[in-house]
Amino acid sequence: EGHLLESGGGLVQPGGSLRLSCAASGFTFSRYPMNWVRQAPGKGLEWVSDINSEGNNAYYADSVKGRFTISRDNAQNTLYLQLNSLKIEDTAIYYCAAPGSYWGQGTQVTVSS
């Protein structure tokens, strides 16, 4: 059975950066497009970004475009999300997902001064 494990979250000041990782196991990672979604306190799930299985096409929500970068290393079965120029409104639990198949448990990102 497939498993996704996020890491890399934490507390950062506005304008700072973080790099989230999502380690995949138990399924053929390289065959799946992957997503990052987030859930801010008291709000619903928000799609952030996705990337195709080969890693050569990526899409972003307008709220993060130009600040976040999704990437993947299929040899290492790992998905990444680079978060730059962080804003207070980026505070959320960030989840990686193989849409329709697997979800991680999430990693908390808190942006605060």
Image: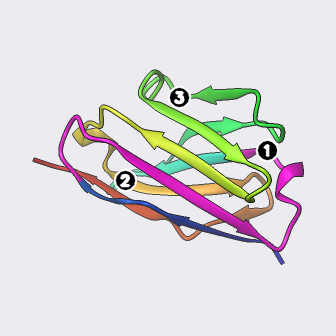
User: How far across and down, in percent of the image, does residue 55 sit?
Assistant: 76, 36
Residue 88 position within the rendered picture, expressed as x and y whole percent measured from the top left: 23, 41
Q: How is this picture coloured?
A: rainbow
Circle nearer the N terminus (2, 3) = 3
| CB-based contact (under 8 Å), mark 1 and mark 2 | no
In this rendering, does residue 44 appear at all?
A: no
Q: Is residue 28 toward the left or the right of residue 11 in the image? A: right
Q: Is residue 63 or residue 58 the one in the foreground?
A: 58
Indicate whether residue 33 is drawn in magenta: yes
C-alpha gap between disc 1 and disc 2 = 22 Å
Residue 51 placement (x, y as % from top left): 71, 37
Image point (37%, 53%), residue name: 92
Label 1: few (<14), some or many (≥20) within 10 Å?
some
Q: Amino acid at mark 1?
A: Pro
SS for tag 3? loop
Instruction: Determine which residue is flagged by label 3.
Output: 61
The verdict on residue 101 being magenta is no
Q: Looking at the rendering, which quadrant does residue 14 occupy?
A: top left
Mark 1 or mark 2, earlier in chain? 1
N-terminal label among 3 and 1: 1
| Dot label at residue 92 | 2
Three-letter code, disc 3: Ala
Cα distance between the residues tagged 2 and 3: 15 Å
**Residue beneath disc 1:** 33
**Which secondary structure, mark 1?**
loop
Q: Which residues are magenta?
A: 12-34
Q: Is residue 22 above or below residue 86?
A: below
Tell me: 108 left or right of 70.
Answer: left
